[in-house]
Image (cartoon, rainbow, N blue to C red):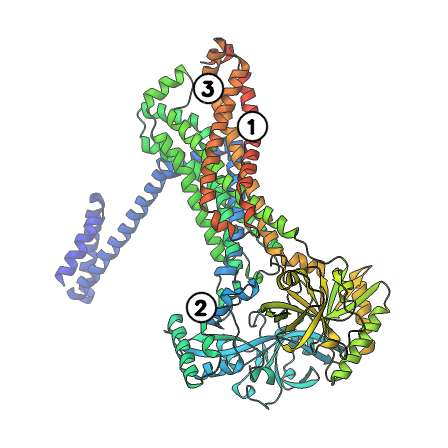
C-alpha cells in the first residue's frame, strides 16, 4: 500500500503550487492520524491515498481550465480571433465591395447548388426501394438493329423487352438473382356506381414484388399462385386508389373491383410511391399518371404474345457482371437444346435499374451542371479580381507594415481571413437562394425528365453547397494573399511615391484574371449559341401537316359490349357520325397519330417490272376516309382515301414523298407494293402524300404507307378532331357523344397536337434556354471584370497619364491606348476560349440536332459580339483617362 500512497502524494505535489503544497500535505497527514485512531492504519492509508488523488484531480482541472481561458483570450487578442474581428470591421467599412462579393458568390453558389439538387435527385439519389443498388433491368438485344436505317430501331437495338415465359424461366434458374419478375404498363376501365373511369395500372408477376421488396400497407402482394393460368382474378391497389375508393378502410380486403368488365378481388394495398418505372413506350395507349393498381399478367402476356419489362434483384455477394455472364450462358445452353428458335439471336444483358430510368437525360443534366460550374468559375475569378483591385492599397499597407517589422505571415493571414469571410457569407446567402431556386427549377424541367419528385434540398445537396463554399473561400482568399506575400516593401513604397502605379506582379494577376474570365465566358457562349441555333433549326423543321386546332382522342370500344368485329365497326361508324354532327368539328380516325409516340413499323416490297426491292422500317398508317384532309396533309399526286375504297374493291395505298423517290424515281402512281404482314396481297399506289414527321421533329422522315381502314384488320382507335373553337369544349362534346353511344367506353387519352410538338422538343428547348441564360450571366461577369480592370488601371496610372498629357499627348491617343490595352486582353481571352471550345466541340455536338449549328459562322458571330460589347465596357474607363487633369494628378503625387 506504500507505493500507491507515495505515487498519489507525488502527483498532488506536482499539481499544486509550492506555497499551497505544504498546507495540503500537512492537513492530509493530520486527517490520516485521526482516521487511523478510529479505523486502523491500513484503512487510514487507503483513505489518505484517495484524498491525495482527489486533490490532484481538482488541481489539474483548475489548471487546465485556466490555461484554456488564457489560450482563448490570447487567440482572441492576437490570433485568428483578432484577424476575424478586424476583417469583420473592414467588411462593414467597405460595404460596396462586400456587397459585390457577397451577391456575386451567392448567385453563383445558389445556381450551382440548385442545379446539383436536380443532378442528385435524378441521377445520384438511390431509388426508393430497399437496397436499390442491387436492382437491375434485364434487356434482350438484337445486334442486327445496330445497322438499321431507322434511328428509332438503332436506339432499341440493346433495349428490347423479353417475353414472360423467358422471365419465368430466369426466375427458376440459378443465375445469381434473388428474384426475377416482369411487368408491363397497362390501361384499365374501372366500372363503379359513378360510371366508368379509364385508369393506369400495371400487369405484373409475383417476382416483380419480390424483387422490389416493398411491404404492403394492407394484405399481401401478388403471390406465385397468381401467376398460373386460371387463377382467381385479383388486384393489388395503390394507396391513392385505396383512399379514393374505400376511404382507407381495412374492409377493402376481399372487396370486388370491376376491371374491363371482369370482377377482381382486392388482396392488398401498396404504399405511395411504389411502382415499376414507366417504360415510356405505351404512353399514348394508356392514361397518364402513376399506376393505381396491379393485376397478374394476362393470358396474352403469359403465353408470350406481348413483351414485358424484366426486373431482377442480385444475390448478395454476386456482382452484376457475374449474373450477366450466367444469364447469357443459360440462354446459349437453352438455344443449343432448342435449335431453330430466335432466342439465340437476342442475347440478354443487364443494366442497373437507376441507369435504365434516367436514360439519355443523364448527359443533359451533366451538361447543365458543367455549364453552371463554369459560371461559378467566372464568378470566383471576378471576386478575386475585385479583391485584388480594391486590395492594392492593402498590398501597400502590407509593404509598410512589413517594412516596420510586422511578420509577413501574420499580415497575409489577415488578408486571407477578410476575403474568405466575405466569400463564406456569400456562400450561406447562396444556400438560402438555392433553397428558393430548387423547387422553381424542378417546375421548369421537361415532363420527360424522370424522378422529378426526388429533386429537393436534401442533406447531400447542402453538404455539396457547403463544400463549394469552402473551396471558393480558399480560392478567393489565397490568391490575393499570395500577391501580397510577394511584395518587396522598399521597391513598392518608393514606386508608390514616384508613380503611384501598381506592381507588375499584381498587374499580371489582374490581366490574367480578365483573360480567364473572357475565355470561360466565350466557351459558354459558343455552347449556348450552338444549342440555341440547333433548337431553332429543329423547331423550324417542316411538320408536313397543320397542328393548329388538332386533337387526338384514343377510344377503345368496350369489348364486353361490342364483341364481334361487326359490332366494333358499327361503333366506329356511330361515333364517327356523332362527331361529324358536332358543331365546329371535323373528325376521322387512324391507327397512330404523328408525333403521338406511337408508330407501326412494317417492311415494304415495291414491285417494278423485272426488278424487286425491299425496304425495312416503313411507317404504316391505317386510316379512315378524310383522315388526310382532317390532318392537313396534302396529297401531291393522285387521290386520297374515299368511301369507295372498301374491302371488296381493289387494294390501294398512298405513299409519302420519301418512299416514292426511293422506290419509283420515274413515278409512283399506278405502281404496286406489298406490306410485310400481308405480303401476299399487292396494293396499287393511288396517291403520293406530303412527307409528315411521324416519330418526332428530331427524327428524319421515314418511308410511309397509308392504307384504308376498310381494307385492313388493324384497329383505328385514334380519333382525329379538327376543332375551330376551344379544345376543352370540343373534347367535352365528344365525351358526351361517346357516352350516348356506349356508357361503358371511356376516352383513354386526349392529345393536343400543339402540346405534342412542344413536348417532343422540350428537352432541347430547356437545354438551350438554360445554357443561354448561364452564358449571358458569365459574359456579364466577364465584362464587369474588364470594366473593373480598365477603371483601376486608369486610377493607378493617373500620375503617368498626367505627365504624358502635360508633355503633349492628345486625348484621342490616351483613349486609344486604354481601349487597345483592354481589347488585347479580350482578344487573348477569345483565342484561349476558342481553343478550349474546339477541344470540346465533339462532346457538344452530341446534343445538337444539326452539326452545322457549331460551325465557323457561330465562332465568328460570338467573337464579334463579345468584341463589340467589350468596346462598350471599355469606353467609359477610356473616356475617364482622357479627362485626367495633369495638374491635379501631379499635385497628388
Q: Nearer the viewer, residue 707 or 406?
A: 707
Given contact means CB atoms under 8 Å apart, are the residues at marks 1 and 2 in contact?
A: no
Task: Identify the residue position indicated by label 3 in the image.
Answer: 797
Q: CA distance from mark 1 to mark 3?
A: 20 Å
Report crowding for label 3: few under 14, some 14 to 19, many 20 or more residues within 10 A (C-alpha): some
Q: Quadrant of the N terminus?
A: bottom left
Q: Residue 156's spot in the image, x, y percent?
A: 53, 67
Q: CA distance from mark 3 to mark 2?
A: 62 Å
Q: CA distance from mark 1 to mark 2?
A: 55 Å
The answer to whether residue 739 is seen in the rendering is: no
- If you read the primary sequence from the N terminus, does the residue marked by circle 1 or circle 3 appear first? 3
Horizontal relation, residue 282 to residue 622: left or right: left
Q: Residue at x 63, y 48 (%)?
A: 536
From what the image shows, is residue 751 above or below residue 482?
below
From what the image shows, is residue 17 above or below residue 231?
above
Q: Residue 717's spot in the image, x, y percent?
A: 72, 73
Label annotation for residue 133: 2
Report crowding for label 2: few under 14, some 14 to 19, many 20 or more residues within 10 A (C-alpha): some
- If you read the primary sequence from the N terminus, does the residue marked by circle 1 or circle 2 appear first? 2
Amino acid at each position: 500500500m506504500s507505493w500507491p500512497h507515495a505515487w498519489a502524494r507525488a502527483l498532488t505535489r506536482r499539481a499544486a503550487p509550492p506555497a499551497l503544497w505544504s498546507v495540503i500535505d500537512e492537513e492530509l497527514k493530520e486527517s490520516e492520524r485521526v482516521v487511523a485512531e478510529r479505523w486502523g492504519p491500513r484503512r487510514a492509508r487507503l483513505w489518505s491515498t484517495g484524498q491525495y488523488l482527489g486533490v490532484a484531480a481538482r488541481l489539474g482541472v483548475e489548471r487546465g481550465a485556466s490555461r484554456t481561458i488564457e489560450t482563448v483570450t490570447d487567440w482572441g487578442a492576437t490570433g485568428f480571433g483578432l484577424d476575424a474581428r478586424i476583417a469583420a470591421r473592414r467588411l462593414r467599412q467597405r460595404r460596396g465591395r462586400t456587397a459585390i462579393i457577397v451577391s456575386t458568390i451567392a448567385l453563383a453558389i445558389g445556381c450551382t447548388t440548385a442545379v446539383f439538387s436536380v443532378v442528385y435527385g435524378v441521377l445520384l439519389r438511390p431509388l426508393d426501394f430497399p437496397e436499390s443498388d442491387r436492382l437491375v433491368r434485364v434487356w434482350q438485344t438484337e445486334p442486327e438493329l445496330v445497322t438499321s436505317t431507322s434511328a428509332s430501331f438503332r436506339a432499341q437495338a440493346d433495349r428490347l423487352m423479353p417475353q414472360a415465359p423467358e422471365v419465368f424461366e430466369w426466375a427458376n434458374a440459378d443465375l445469381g438473382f434473388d428474384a426475377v419478375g416482369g411487368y408491363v404498363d397497362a390501361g384499365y376501365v374501372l366500372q363503379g356506381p359513378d360510371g366508368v373511369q379509364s385508369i393506369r395500372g400495371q400487369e405484373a408477376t409475383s417476382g416483380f414484388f419480390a424483387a422490389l421488396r416493398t411491404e404492403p400497407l394492407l394484405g399481401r402482394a401478388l403471390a406465385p399462385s397468381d401467376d398460373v393460368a386460371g387463377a382467381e382474378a385479383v388486384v393489388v391497389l395503390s394507396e391513392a386508389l385505396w383512399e379514393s375508393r374505400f376511404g382507407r378502410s381495412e374492409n377493402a380486403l376481399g372487396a370486388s373491383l370491376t376491371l374491363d368488365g371482369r370482377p377482381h378481388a382486392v388482396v392488398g394495398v401498396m404504399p405511395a410511391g411504389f411502382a415499376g418505372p414507366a417504360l415510356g413506350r405505351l404512353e399514348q395507349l394508356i392514361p397518364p399518371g402513376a399506376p393505381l393498381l396491379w393485376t397478374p399478367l394476362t393470358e396474352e402476356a403469359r403465353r408470350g404474345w406481348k413483351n414485358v419489362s424484366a426486373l431482377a434483384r442480385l444475390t448478395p455477394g454476386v456482382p452484376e457482371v457475374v449474373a450477366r455472364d450466367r444469364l447469357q450462358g443459360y440462354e446459349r445452353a437453352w438455344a443449343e437444346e432448342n435449335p431453330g428458335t430466335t432466342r439465340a439471336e437476342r442475347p440478354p444483358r443487364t443494366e442497373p435499374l437507376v441507369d435504365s430510368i434516367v436514360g439519355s437525360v443523364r448527359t443533359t443534366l451533366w451538361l447543365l451542371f458543367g455549364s453552371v460550374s463554369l459560371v461559378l468559375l467566372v464568378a470566383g475569378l471576378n471576386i478575386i479580381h475585385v479583391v485584388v483591385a480594391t486590395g492594392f492599397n492593402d498590398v501597400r499597407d502590407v509593404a509598410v507594415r512589413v517594412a516596420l517589422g510586422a511578420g509577413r505571415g501574420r499580415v497575409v493571414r489577415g488578408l486571407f481571413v477578410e476575403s474568405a469571410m466575405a466569400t463564406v457569407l456569400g456562400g450561406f446567402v447562396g444556400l438560402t437562394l438555392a433553397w428558393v431556386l430548387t423547387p422553381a427549377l424542378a417546375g421548369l424541367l421537361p415532363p420527360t425528365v424522370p424522378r422529378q419528385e426526388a429533386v429537393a434540398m436534401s442533406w447531400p445537396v447542402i453538404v455539396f453547397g457547403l463544400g463549394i463554399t469552402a473551396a471558393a473561400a480558399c480560392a478567393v482568399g489565397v490568391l490575393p494573399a499570395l500577391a501580397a506575400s510577394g511584395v518587396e516593401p522598399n521597391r513598392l513604397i518608393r514606386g508608390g511615391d514616384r508613380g503611384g502605379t501598381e506592381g507588375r506582379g499584381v498587374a499580371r494577376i489582374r490581366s490574367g484574371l480578365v483573360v480567364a474570365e473572357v475565355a470561360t465566358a466565350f466557351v459558354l457562349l459558343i455552347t449556348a449559341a450552338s444549342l440555341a441555333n440547333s433548337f431553332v433549326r429543329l423547331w423550324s423543321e417542316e411538320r408536313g401537316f397543320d397542328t393548329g386546332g388538332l386533337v387526338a382522342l384514343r377510344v377503345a370500344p368496350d369489348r364486353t359490349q361490342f364483341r364481334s368485329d361487326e359490332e366494333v365497326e358499327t361503333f366506329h361508324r356511330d361515333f364517327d357520325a356523332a362527331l361529324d354532327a358536332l358543331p365546329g368539328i371535323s373528325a376521322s380516325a387512324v391507327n397512330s397519330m404523328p408525333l403521338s409516340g406511337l408508330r407501326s413499323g412494317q417492311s415494304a416490297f415495291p414491285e417494278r417490272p423485272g426488278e424487286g426491292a425491299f425496304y425495312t422500317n416503313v411507317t404504316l398508317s391505317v386510316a379512315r376516309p378524310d383522315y388526310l384532309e382532317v390532318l392537313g396533309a396534302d396529297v401531291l399526286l393522285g387521290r386520297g382515301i374515299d368511301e369507295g375504297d372498301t374491302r371488296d374493291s381493289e387494294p390501294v395505298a398512298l405513299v409519302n414523298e420519301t418512299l416514292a423517290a426511293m422506290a419509283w424515281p420515274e413515278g409512283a402512281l399506278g405502281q404496286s407494293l406489298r406490306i410485310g404482314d400481308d405480303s401476299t396481297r399487292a396494293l396499287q399506289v393511288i396517291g403520293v402524300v406530303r412527307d409528315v414527321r411521324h416519330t418526332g421533329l428530331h427524327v428524319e422522315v421515314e418511308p410511309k404507307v397509308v392504307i384504308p381502314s376498310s381494307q385492313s384488320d388493324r384497329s383505328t382507335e385514334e380519333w382525329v378532331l379538327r376543332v375551330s373553337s376551344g379544345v376543352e369544349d370540343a373534347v367535352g362534346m365528344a365525351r358526351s357523344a361517346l357516352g350516348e353511344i356506349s356508357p361503358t367506353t371511356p376516352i383513354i387519352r386526349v392529345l393536343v397536337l400543339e402540346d405534342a410538338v412542344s413536348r417532343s422538343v422540350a428537352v432541347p428547348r430547356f437545354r438551350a434556354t438554360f445554357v443561354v441564360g448561364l452564358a449571358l450571366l458569365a459574359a456579364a461577369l466577364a465584362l464587369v471584370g474588364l470594366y473593373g480592370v480598365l477603371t483601376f488601371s486608369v486610377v493607378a496610372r493617373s500620375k503617368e497619364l498626367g505627365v504624358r498629357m502635360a508633355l503633349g499627348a492628345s486625348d484621342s491617343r490616351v483613349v486609344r491606348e486604354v481601349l487597345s490595352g483592354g481589347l488585347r486582353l479580350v482578344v487573348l481571352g477569345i483565342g484561349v476560349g476558342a481553343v478550349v471550345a474546339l477541344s470540346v466541340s465533339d462532346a457538344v455536338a452530341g446534343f445538337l440536332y444539326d452539326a452545322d449549328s457549331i460551325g465557323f459562322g457561330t465562332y465568328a458571330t460570338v467573337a464579334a459580339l463579345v468584341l463589340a460589347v467589350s468596346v462598350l465596357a471599355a469606353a467609359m474607363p477610356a473616356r475617364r483617362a482622357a479627362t485626367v487633369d495633369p495638374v491635379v494628378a501631379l499635385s497628388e503625387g
